[in-house]
Image: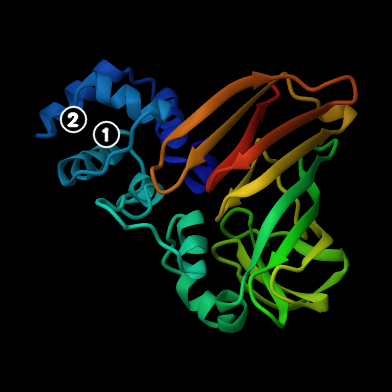
């Protein structure tokens, strides 16, 4: 559970899971941090766990490093989930498509070299108007397939490609495009150790600026693994996001919680308990979905 939380984040969730599994209260964490020279209030720790705030100052980041030691976590495992430090002042908003994509994935060090291989697609991106996905969990509690529909709009004339990224867990192949509508997979770059890939989708037609196209594709996991969450990383505001999570009869969860994390602020909010309907389906919908991570966690116990 800790390993999964550290891999997918967000920071607040990984911190909360680690503290729970180590059996340490906020007050105990505060005392242990203070013993090692880090002064952090229990209220601040509570805000970090709930996502109401995020450690950003230099002394706070140092405290997170000590926190990793207190919780017996790998060095840098919590710090990695914080991504880059929050920009400050007026006019610090990033407008570069590549920057937006890197920010959405938490600025991993391996991403810039991959994006450099797709220079044309990164420099001539599409805008996603609507995004609908169906995530399926099989009877063995493993993720099998994701079906995605996207309404896209070209930002420039002669737009013919777009990029999609996918991630599983380290050492496990990420889902691969197995079927598509009005597009086809082109070049694919995969980092097996990271469980990460970028796929270039070649559109069936060349779009003019402002022209829209509804595309669809399915992604299948080459090596399914038991999963207790799924999240969608949105690099730029989407008019409508709809997530549909379908559970097999033998894998219906006893509890589910939705959440979202905004970027670049890093605040996690929207923790809401939900239950599958009669068809063992959970639906998550967002109007004007802000950049960040929109997810669902579930449990069988």
In the rendered image, the quadrant that contains the N terminus is top right
Q: Position of residue 10 (x, y in %)?
A: 47, 41
Q: Quadrant of residue 212?
A: bottom right
Q: Residues within 10 Å of mark 2 (few under 14, many from 20)?
A: many
Task: Return the mark for residue 70.
Answer: 1
Q: Nearer the viewer, residue 66 or 269?
A: 269
Residue 141 seen in this snapshot: no
- State the CA–CA distance, disc 2 to disc 1: 8 Å
Q: Residue at x 54, y 36 (%)?
A: 260
Q: Earlier in the sequence, mark 2 or mark 1?
A: 2
The residue at 28%/39% (across/down) is: 55
291 left or right, relative to 140: left
SS under mark 2: helix
Task: Return the x and y of residue 287 as percentages of the image width and height.
Answer: 66, 37
Q: Is residue 18 left or right of residue 169?
A: left
| Residue at (59% x, 51% y) in the render | 234
């Amino acid at each position: 559970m800790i390993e999964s939380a550290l891999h997918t984040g967000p920071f607040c969730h990984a911190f909360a899971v680690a503290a729970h599994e180590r059996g340490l209260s906020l007050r105990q964490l505060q005392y242990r941090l203070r013993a090692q020279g880090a002064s952090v209030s229990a209220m601040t720790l509570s805000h970090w766990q709930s996502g109401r705030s995020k450690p950003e100052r230099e002394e706070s980041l140092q405290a997170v490093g000590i926190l990793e030691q207190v919780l017996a976590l790998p060095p840098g495992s919590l710090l990695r989930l914080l991504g880059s430090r929050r920009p400050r002042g007026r006019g610090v908003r990033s407008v570069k498509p590549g920057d937006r994509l890197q920010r959405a994935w938490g600025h991993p060090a391996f991403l810039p070299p991959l994006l450099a291989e797709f220079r044309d697609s990164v420099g001539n991106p599409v805008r996603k108007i609507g995004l609908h996905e169906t995530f399926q969990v099989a009877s063995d509690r493993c993720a099998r397939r994701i079906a995605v529909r996207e309404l896209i709009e070209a930002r420039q004339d002669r737009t013919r490609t777009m990029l999609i990224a996918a991630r599983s867990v380290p050492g496990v192949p990420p889902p691969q495009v197995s079927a598509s509508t009005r597009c086809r997979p082109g070049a694919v770059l995969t980092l097996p150790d990271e469980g990460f890939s970028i796929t270039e989708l070649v559109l069936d037609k060349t779009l003019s600026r402002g022209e829209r196209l509804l595309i669809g594709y399915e992604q299948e996991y080459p090596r399914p693994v038991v999963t207790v969450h799924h999240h969608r990383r949105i690099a730029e505001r989407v008019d409508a996001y709809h997530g549909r999570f379908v559970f097999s009869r033998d894998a219906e969860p006893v509890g589910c919680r939705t959440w979202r994390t905004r970027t670049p602020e890093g605040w996690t909010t929207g923790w809401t308990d939900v239950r599958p309907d009669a068809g063992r389906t959970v639906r998550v919908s967002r109007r004007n979905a802000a950049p960040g991570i929109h997810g669902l966690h579930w449990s069988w116990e």
